[in-house]
Image: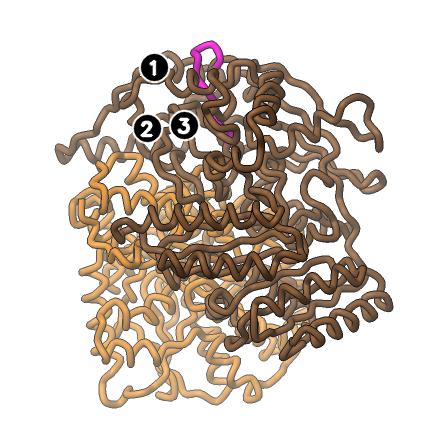
Chain colours: A orange, B brown
Amino acid sequence: MDLKLDDDELNTCVQCGLCLPHCPTFRVTGDESMSPRGRIHLMREVQLHNAPVTPEVVSSFETCVQCRGCEPACPSSVPYGHLMERTRETLADEGIMTPRWQRLGMKPLAHPKLLATGTKFLSVAQRLNLVPKRLGISAEVPFRQAPLEVSGTDVLMFTGCVMDAWQRDVHQAGQTVLEAAGFGVTPTGDLAPCCGALHAHAGLANDTRSLATSMMAALSQAHFADVPIVVDSAGCGAQMKDYGHLLGTAEAEAFSSRVFDISEFLADHLDKLPRGTPIAERVAIQDPCHLRHVQRVHLATRKVLEVFVDDLVELDDDGLCCGAGGAYSIMQPVLAGQIRDRKVEAIDAKSPDLVASSNPGCSMHLGAAGVPTVHPMELVARAIAG
Amino acid sequence: MSVLSSINKNIRDRLAGRGATVTAHAVADERLVEDLRSALAPDRVRMDSVGRSLHAKDASVFKGGVAGPTCYPTSTAEVQAIMRISHHHGRAIVPRGAGTGLAGGAIPLGAPVVIAMTKMNEILEVDIDNRVAWVEPGVVNLDLTRYLTPMGFHFAPDPSSQQVCTIGGNVANNSGGPHCLAYGVTNAHVQAMEVVLPDGSVTMLGGLDAEPAGLDLRGVFIGSEGTLGITTKVAVAITKNRPAVKTLLLSFDSVSDAANTVSGIIAAGIVPAALEVMDHKITVAVENYVNAGYPRDAAAVLLAEVDGMEAGIAIDAGRIEEIGLANGATDVRTAKDDEERALLWKGRKTAFGAIAQLAPDYYLHDTVVPRSELANVLVKVYEIADRHDLVVMNVFHAGDGNLHPLLLFDARDEGVMDRVHAAGGEIVQASLDAGGVLSGEHGVGVEKQGYMGKLFSDDDMDHQDRLRKAFDPTCRANPGKVIPIGHSCADIQALRRVPTGVWG
């Protein structure tokens, strides 16, 4: 089957295996078919040598978390993330991956009203103990949230789908910090309902492209031209920075260059922030994969937090994934749990009071295992309020 | 139900739903798989086309391996069971670690049972007082060092693939690494091993005493490339971290100047922790990846590291600089901190992977020559590659005289493999002519088998074969490797056992 992969991109892998220890699924299974090298080998077999797409081949692709921890480890810079997204796109188009019920489940992400209604149902169901634990929704989903107010147009703050519905308090903290640094903030709200990251992971490229196109149109209107877009979710930020590659247009490139992770943005404006009272608890930094391996701006989180947290500690696990992976923890609960066990072990070794993570998926997934997570912006907001 | 099988069932349903065909592979030896599954667990014996396809390869260029079922044992008893069952069914076995071997040592020949040791990855015990650690063979080399770091120790052999390769693989290949110049290769850091022999019996080789009694069978086993049996527990020596380290980066206008500097340093009686040379092309490729500040315009760079007491290494570093300058070094720089040092080493250790920037395939050689011959042999290596119209890059453990010429090519070019093999043969011959040996650390595997006759007489090889048969009388452990096949008829039988096409 033609997976529609670029032959040259496929050929950049020399099968040296240096990616293996950086792959969370290989780490917990020791199985070559669950490693980046193995998956690339199978892509080649299918595309170049017409190997049949057996259940084992599909499972090798489906079990990938798409954390892209293999990419910085690869001395040949194999564009693994793009290869995997394209593979999934082809298999989804063929009806082999991402069945209809999954596609249906993603619909509300792009429809804020539907998501809001769904959230209310979920909130009630949670209170009635009707939500199975294995879904990994650790925190109580809010029934009602105060809206975010526009305070100016110095920066656009991307609020997104699930995060806005479930964790708006994090956005509120981010907005407070940006305002404390003197920026007038426009939360994007319904203007740009969803970045399309989960769709891209599931191989639904057309949905991703249409979400990207409509977001670009909405956030590039004349009065927003050149206004930086600040994102407090690592997964969304990574996706929006990839629009240039996704759409292949100059406008998309220009749009992507306006996107910043919120810590990345604030790291350049630290002098404008009041110092407040430093956080007294011991805080461990857990880098979301899409911040560290994809955006590669994880050092900014440290630069910002160092100012506001006295006892900041690093984990010794080389930035290995926590197993959240967008919808991965729901689709592959067993593997996601095993990967998380490793992360929890690394966290426990440092005995922190709080774990700072700037991705809603990671914080929910870790939270479900009893890890006390907090968004870096919540810490900064707390310190400033002092 | 296991993770994998439950996932697979789900997908199978989906594929079946849309009318896709799920190919049931013809399995000649269902009973073998059945026996293996009942001895281990159903989900730890793979026999599907994906498993066979993936385990037919390692990191070498060799194709044509054919894997049988793959087992993932989790205990010594399970390894014994696999050995007994394979023996009972007349099947060979091939052990596999991380699959990073470059000589094809883990390539399965004759559809053997593949024993993947990745799940036996526990660090069992660390005894700081006696400076020894018991580990399972699937422990990743660098994981062990990371585990020991807070205690102030490390595992000294540090192959370039140390972030992924396993201790079991290090034992099988007697692996070296940049820092083995001062500390010795794997052989010097393994005290004892629990091994499972091809008949399924378990024995302990070596011991924790300084001078274990009897013949050194431990030494025989280390570097035997899986042809004598399989390790299930290893007692490794752990090395105290040195109080101070200095890393120098010297640039040269020619590879010969770098080689002569290396020779000069050793001749002066200095034993640095590491002496590594990279030529111009590989230095640029590495620098593109790590941005460590390697000079892009030097014809060669020498990475020299000294460790020990602060005062002592300052003197050694000064002398190395002098010797370098006397041999034409154009620049000498010292890494200013641990971070810069780590970056320089990251560059050196990922060099092989970095070459895909230049070509999709490479063939990495591994010969050893006397240090005094380094410069001469290098000139010949460049000549040979030139003659065969191939690009060659040199990156090597200069202190040991261990050459690693890398031939770059694109396997899609017609006829290129013939040129690659011809050039490789001449490089090996040139090293042997200079008084060198076939392999420094990658092993013989299938790669160097054809060259064994150039280094050993028939008599030598017959004796090696007899020693092997003392451990493995029917040649079922990794058959078709190391000793040329003509020297071992039992090997031929093991390889012919399975009708072709069965495991295809």
- Element marked by disc 3: loop
Q: CA distance from mark 3 to mark 2?
A: 18 Å
Q: Would residue B89 be counted in the magenta stretch? A: yes
- Region in magenta: B87-95
- Seen in the picture, residue B72 relative to A356 is either above or below; the reply is above
> Of residues A95 and B230, which is closer to you in this image?
B230
Residue at the spot of label 2:
B48
- Seen in the picture, residue A369 relative to A381 is either above or below; the reply is above
Q: Where does residue B124 sit, x and y in percent of width and height?
A: 69, 34
Q: CA distance from mark 3 to mark 1?
A: 19 Å
Name which residue lies at 25% across and 24% down: B25
Q: Where does residue A255 sit, x and y in percent of width and height?
A: 29, 79
- Seen in the picture, residue B91 relative to B427 is either above or below; the reply is above
Q: CA distance from mark 1 to mark 2?
A: 12 Å
Asked if both marks, 3 and 2, belong to the same chain, the answer given is yes
Residue at the spot of label 1:
B30
**Which one is earlier in the sequence, the residue at label 3 or at label 2?**
2
Give the chain of mark 3: B
User: Which disc number belongs to residue B109?
Assistant: 3
> Of residues A278 and B156, which is closer to you in this image?
B156
Give the chain of mark 2: B
* Quarter of the view holding residue B295: bottom right
* Quarter of the view holding residue A161: bottom left
Q: Where does residue B419 sit, x and y in percent of width and height?
A: 35, 50
| Front label number (3 vs 2) | 3
